[in-house]
Amino acid sequence: MSEQNFDMEVDVVVLGTGGGGLTAAMAAHDFGAGEVLILEKFGMIGGTSAMSGGMLWIPLNDQQEKYGVEDSFEEVVAYVDGLADDGHLEAETFGAFLEEGPEMLRWFEEKTPVKLRLFEGFPDYQSWAEGAKEFGSRSLDNDVFPFVELGSWAKWVNPPKTGWPRRTSMIEDYYSPGLSEEELADREARDCRGQGQALIGSLLKGVLDRNIPLHRESRARHLIHDGNRVVGVVTEEGGKELRIKARKGVIIATGGFEWNERLVNSFLRGPMTGPVSVPECEGDGLLMAMEVGASLGNMGKSWWLQSSMELAAHGRGKANYLIGNSERTRPRGILVNRDAKRFVNEAANYNAIGPVLFNWDANRHDYVNLPFWIIVDQTYVDTYRFFNTTQAGVAPPWAVSADTVEELGNKLGLDGKVLNETVTKFNADVANGRDTEFGRGDNTYDNFWGDRNFEGAHRTLGPIENAPFYAVKMESGVLGTCGGPRMNSDAQVIDWNDKPIEGLYICSNAMSSPTAGVYGGAGGTLGPGMTFGFIAGRHAAMKG
Ligand SMILES: Cc1cc2nc3c(=O)[nH]c(=O)nc-3n(C[C@H](O)[C@H](O)[C@H](O)COP(=O)(O)OP(=O)(O)OC[C@H]3O[C@@H](n4cnc5c(N)ncnc54)[C@H](O)[C@@H]3O)c2cc1C
């Protein structure tokens, strides 16, 4: 190796503290790396993962047996390969995900504070497809985790967008087991948090238990290489550049590139205007890996999601985008496009709706379904939470309202008469119990997030009939991008000749998705993302 100057030296450096990064650091430690170091660009830990639902989609997990579910390699392959674009699924990395995901879960259970439980009944996202588990078993949820166990580190965990962590798990939120006053008080006292907070809290506890150092406000900028081998990283810390030698490997876990306008415009298959992730996901890892010749995959795809911009721009000086998920699934609401017409099954999963927004009109030379709006009535606003409003019956301040549907359409700059026809047609379908245009409510997934006071398709189908009527403009958003440097089954980044770039590893949203952008079910990003963190840490420690 040629002589290079370094400011410090460790075995493995991990870039980023989302689910993948923290998993990778712990795995590197447990499989034999003596010195592991984590660098985090932001002052807070956990990235988007800490704000998330924290669920993991891991097919063939051991808990399936306990819950009496049969699953097989062939079924999962039929499911994901059937949904992926032809020729896009790479057998090597997809196979590694299926093999190592359950292994990671065993290691979590035995060696770490991470506690995951199968979410019974949560359907795979394309519940109608061959190989799908229509009634769940591949999605896992976190038990609540007491933040008092983090000591003074608790204050450095990135909070959810609402600012307040939930004291309950996803399973508890869904099935409402009715926790006693004592249980809730105890959770409050121990600062027990569920969902993404529980995931990052428990991962961070594992990192602290192992005495793995973590530098906050340290932005990795460049990889240092010696020939074809990556031997370290240059990071910006405290206004200075620090050169860190990594004897066994550098693991990129820096999230996607959705907040980097140039990368978004260069790569994504259509306009993307509303990312809901942390603004630090600017593709730093992608840029660093491109500099050393990484091969790229899935660059046009994303974990698509429909969002809306809150009026007040915040979030570190960048606009704040809110997820519009249950909003479009519940009864008494529809999505309409610039022609004031419905264009999609509103209750389909967010990732599947994304590409519908990129339908192109050759005559107009523009997108047919952009911009788009959600339209609801007063009963909807009285019954459900509409975006981040906490007061029943009150729409968010950025909603447009009117006493008639036609007037609402005109206020939005649409053809009000057409909007009225659209709503009238939808209401007639609702009355007949079947969405004849888009089949909304025809499958198990559609109705899962609907209103469980109703049965069947009526969980998602309800009339839009009571004034005033409201509209909120929606954005073509993402949870994060899912394209990036390609890797092999050991999570080693590969070059354009499919040869590993020694010393360089990748995981989570920074990598080229091993499911080729197929969102299998709840946890479809964190499941594969953390599995590759586990593989990367283990390989770097043992063979790096
Ligand atoms: C409300 C919500 C709910 C969600 N629920 C789920 C769910 O239940 N299951 C699921 O699978 N997905 C869910 N998602 C999506 C999921 O959160 C993300 O896909 C996932 O967290 C991405 O993980 P990551 O590690 O790639 O990125 P992040 O968690 O964003 O972590 C990346 C980290 O890298 C840091 N970083 C960036 N650049 C650098 C650099 N140069 N040097 C050092 N550090 C750097 C960032 O600051 C950040 O902390 C949800 C998202 C949201 C917003």
Image (cartoon, rainbow, N blue to C red):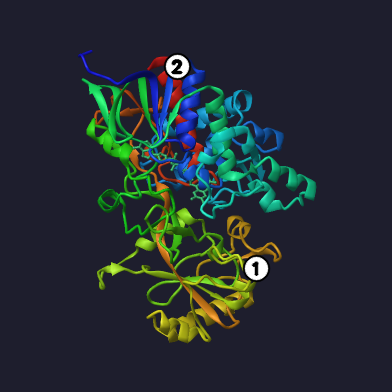
Ligand 1 within 8 Å of the CB at mark 2: no
Query: Can the viewer see residue 96?
Result: no
Percent of width and height locating residue 298: 34, 43
Q: In the rendered image of this protein, does residue 237 appear above or below residue 79?
A: above
Q: Amino acid at mark 1?
A: His
Kind of residue at badge 2: Ala
How many neighbours does mark 1 have within 10 angstroms: few (below 14), some (14-19), or many (20 or more)? many
**Residue at the image point whose x is 62% and y is 62% from the top:** 450
**Residue 17, image quadrant:** top left
Task: Mark 2 or mark 1: name the one nearer the start of the chain.
Answer: 2
Q: Mark 1 CB in 8 Å range of ligand 1?
A: no
Looking at the image, which is closer to me, 238 or 256?
238
Q: Residue 479: horizontal and vertical position, in percent?
A: 44, 50
User: Quarter of the picture for ligand 1?
Assistant: top left
Query: Considering the image in quadrants, where does the C terminus appear?
Result: top left
Quick one: SS at disc 1?
Answer: helix
Query: Disc 2 on helix, strand or loop?
Result: loop
Name the residue beneath numbered marker 2: 33
Mark 2 surroundings within 10 Å by alpha-carbon count, few (fewer than 14), some (14 through 19), many (20 or more): many
Give me the disc on residue 458: 1
- Residue at 59% x, 77% y: name it: 378
411 up-or-down from 218: above or below: below
